[in-house]
Amino acid sequence: MSDLSAQNLTIASIEVEGNRMADESLILSVSDLTVGSVLTSTATQDAIRHIYDLGLFSDVQLLGEIEDDKYIDLIIKVEEYPVVTEVQYKGNDEISDKDLREIDSIRIGQMISPNQVLASVKQIKAKYQDKGYYRVKIESELKEVTDDPLTNEHILVFNIDEGPKIRIREIEFVGNEVFTDDKLRSKMGNKPKGFLRSGNFDPEKHEEDKEKIVQFYREKGYIDAAILSDTVIIDEVDPRWMTVQIEVYEGPRYYFGETSFYGHK
């Protein structure tokens, strides 16, 4: 067998090896390699890239047997991504399997790439963080269904360490001189834990709260007001608690008349 170190050979034949689910005609079509054409270095690189771009294979190689230093019997050797026959979730006490499946993009019976698994991990993590589990850890593993080398079936397992639910201990503001922290907090939907308040942190509500704060300033004449940054700080001693810190820019106050307005520093 040759690794195609010799170039500019005429292709005498083409075979595909290693494909179990992927259609051979599809592989041949995207490779742009045809019997009778010359196998150049560029054609080799393009073929490998185009086959990879299908998103079905973890490895693609072009091999072949050279005849008379002119011709090559070409072999396109591929290694398919594993096929998922089942998805399992372990360690999920706060979110049901059913709810996780609804947001998980993995589908039974499809080949999956590492990037697809990573995307699912991010989706699951986002779901937990929406519920206040900011220290959730998720690891994935693929388990072979059978030792039969002719199959490529795997069980995808997500091992979940939910960690503690984190609540808001305090909401602090930086840069506010005109309005107090209490005044700005009163405009927010997210609240620190207190009597009849859970202290749960809602990311969507947090985005709305920032808009409410800016709108409040503008209604009071601070047209240039803006949120410069917002930070969630997890308590290192007791990770069940967080502090939300919001940095505001107030800017000058504008006074509006019937036909003109001016700023007051």
Image (tube, helix red, strand yellow):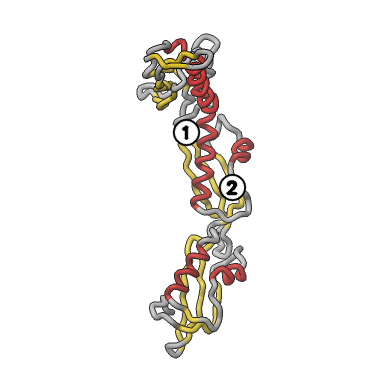
Q: Which mark is residue 106?
A: 2
Horizontal and vertical percent position of residue 239? 41, 24
**Residue 165 placement, left or right of 24:** left
Task: Rate crowding at label 1 as few (under 14), some (14 to 19) or many (20 or more) other CA atoms within 10 Å.
Answer: some
Task: Name the residue rendered at 39%, 80% in the picture.
Answer: 6
Question: Judging from the image, what secondary structure is the residue with disc 2 in?
Answer: loop
> Quick one: 189 or 55, which is closer to the camera?
189
Q: Amino acid at mark 2?
A: Ile
Relative to 57, is 142 above or below? above
The image's mark for residue 136 is 1
Give the residue displayed 62% in from the left and 67% down from the top. 23
Disc 1 from disc 2: Cα separation: 20 Å
Residue 83: which quarter of the image?
Answer: bottom right
User: Reading the chain from its start, which is encountered first: label 1 or label 2?
Assistant: 2
Classify 10 Å Cα crowding around label 2: few (below 14), some (14-19), many (20 and above).
some
Q: Position of residue 144 (x, y in %)?
A: 54, 54
Up the image or down, 74 lies above or below 187; here it is below
Is residue 37 depicted above or below 68 in this figure? above
The single residue placed furthest to the bottom in the displayed view is 68
Amino acid carrying label 1: it is Val
Q: What secondary structure is found at the residue carrying circle 1?
A: loop
